[in-house]
């Protein structure tokens, strides 16, 4: 009788062990299935960030026509502009070109920054954004493909698109330095030319340029947002100082005009300094390049009104 009970107990225990094992397997399987459903059907939340990409250092482009290896060719900048329009028309959810910052217009090579809006995944543990499986890190060299263009460059800034910052504008006073305008005739002494065995000091820019400068002229970016606007303008007749045989004679120069300006410009502030187009320091004595339609104006800053 005792032997029979032992056999029954052993049989029951073996049955229970088998069922526990089966329950464990089924439980693990259910957990894996649930995890897979959550992973594939409920992916990690995505968020949009704004990335400022410096595309100036692109080494895989033909640079035969480029003197400065830190500037992309003109044709590449124009392709970015065209891609900006096409990409924004397509309403790509993952990546868009929002803006492009370049110092001047015209067929010259130039440094350039591209502002991208990118759909990323945020990792709370590492506190990092990633795109295409690659972390977005300031200072890292990244590659982005959109529409019909590939953008390679160094990440300068990463900011949450939820933080909408109002554009910052300041007013500056400036004058137009004659040396920055044609005919670029300069001798060993600054602004001196030799004429009729005498030395001539000119003050003013060519009148055909000065006549194009008017109050209300504006420069806008690719989003049609204001970059610069001429608020006030003062023009005076240009002069020449003729130095001959030790005598100085002041004469009017009908072909030149002295021009001073008050200009409102959009800037970004890093630390205590302002920057135009996100990269050119706004400092008294510095020269900035402004472009009003087909008029290129190098201006020399004389005062900053914050």
Image (tube, helix red, strand yellow):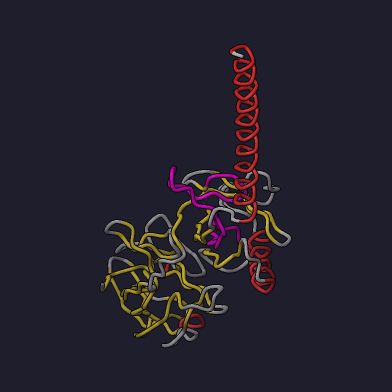
Q: Position of residue 297 (x, y in %)?
A: 47, 73
Which image quarter: residue 273?
A: bottom left
Q: Give the range drawn in magenta.
A: 107-135
User: What residue is drawn where x is 57% and y is 49%?
Assistant: 153
Quadrant housing residue 236? bottom left
For this view, does 232 lie left or right of residue 113? left
Task: Write the residue at 65% across / 21% down.
Answer: 11
The residue furthest front is 1
Please state, as top left, top right, bottom left or bottom right, where the C terminus lies in the image. Answer: bottom left
The residue closer to the viewer here, 182 or 226, is 226
Quarter of the picture holding the N terminus: top right
Q: Quadrant of residue 172?
A: bottom left
Judge whether 147 appears above or below 236 on screen: above
174 and 255: which one is in front?
Answer: 174
Determine whether, in the image, residue 6 is placed left or right of residue 242. right
- Magenta span includes 132: yes
Residue with the most extreme top position: 3
- Front residue of 19/258: it is 19
Reply yes or no: does residue 123 show up in magenta. Answer: yes
Residue 229, percent across and down? 42, 81
Q: Where is residue 8 in the image (x, y as percent from the top left)?
A: 63, 21
Question: What count of labels does the image hold?
Answer: 0
The image position of residue 83, as x and y in percent, is 68, 66
Image position of 172 (left or right of 214): left
| Near-viewer residue (295 or 241) | 295
* Residue at screen point 50% across, 50% down: 129
């Amino acid at each position: 009788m005792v032997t029979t009970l032992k056999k029954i107990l052993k049989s029951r225990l073996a049955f229970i062990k088998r069922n526990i094992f089966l329950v464990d397997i089924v439980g693990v399987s259910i957990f894996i299935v649930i995890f897979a459903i959550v992973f594939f059907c409920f992916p990690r939340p995505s968020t949009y960030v704004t990335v400022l990409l410096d595309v100036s250092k692109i080494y895989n482009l033909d640079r035969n026509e480029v003197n400065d290896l830190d500037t992309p060719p003109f044709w590449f900048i124009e392709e970015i502009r065209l891609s900006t329009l096409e990409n924004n028309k397509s309403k790509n959810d993952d990546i868009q070109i929002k803006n492009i910052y370049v110092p001047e217009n015209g067929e010259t090579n130039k440094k350039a920054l591209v502002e991208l809006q990118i759909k990323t995944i945020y990792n709370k543990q590492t506190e990092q954004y990633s795109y295409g499986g690659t972390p977005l890190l300031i200072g890292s060299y990244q590659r982005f493909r959109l529409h019909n263009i590939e953008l390679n460059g160094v990440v300068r800034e990463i900011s949450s698109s939820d933080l909408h910052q109002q554009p910052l504008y300041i007013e500056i006073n400036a004058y137009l330095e004659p040396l920055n305008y044609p005919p670029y005739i300069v001798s060993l002494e600054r602004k001196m030319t030799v004429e009729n065995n005498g030395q001539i000091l000119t003050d003013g820019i060519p009148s055909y340029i000065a006549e194009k400068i008017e109050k209300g002229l504006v420069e806008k970016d690719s989003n049609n947002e204001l970059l610069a606007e001429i608020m006030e303008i003062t023009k005076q007749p240009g002069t020449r100082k003729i130095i001959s045989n030790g005598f100085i004679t002041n004469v009017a120069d009908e072909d030149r005009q002295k021009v001073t300006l008050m200009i409102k410009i959009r800037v970004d502030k890093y630390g205590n300094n302002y920057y135009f187009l996100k990269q050119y320091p706004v400092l008294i004595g510095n020269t900035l390049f402004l472009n009003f339609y087909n008029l290129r104006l190098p201006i020399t800053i004389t005062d900053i009104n914050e």
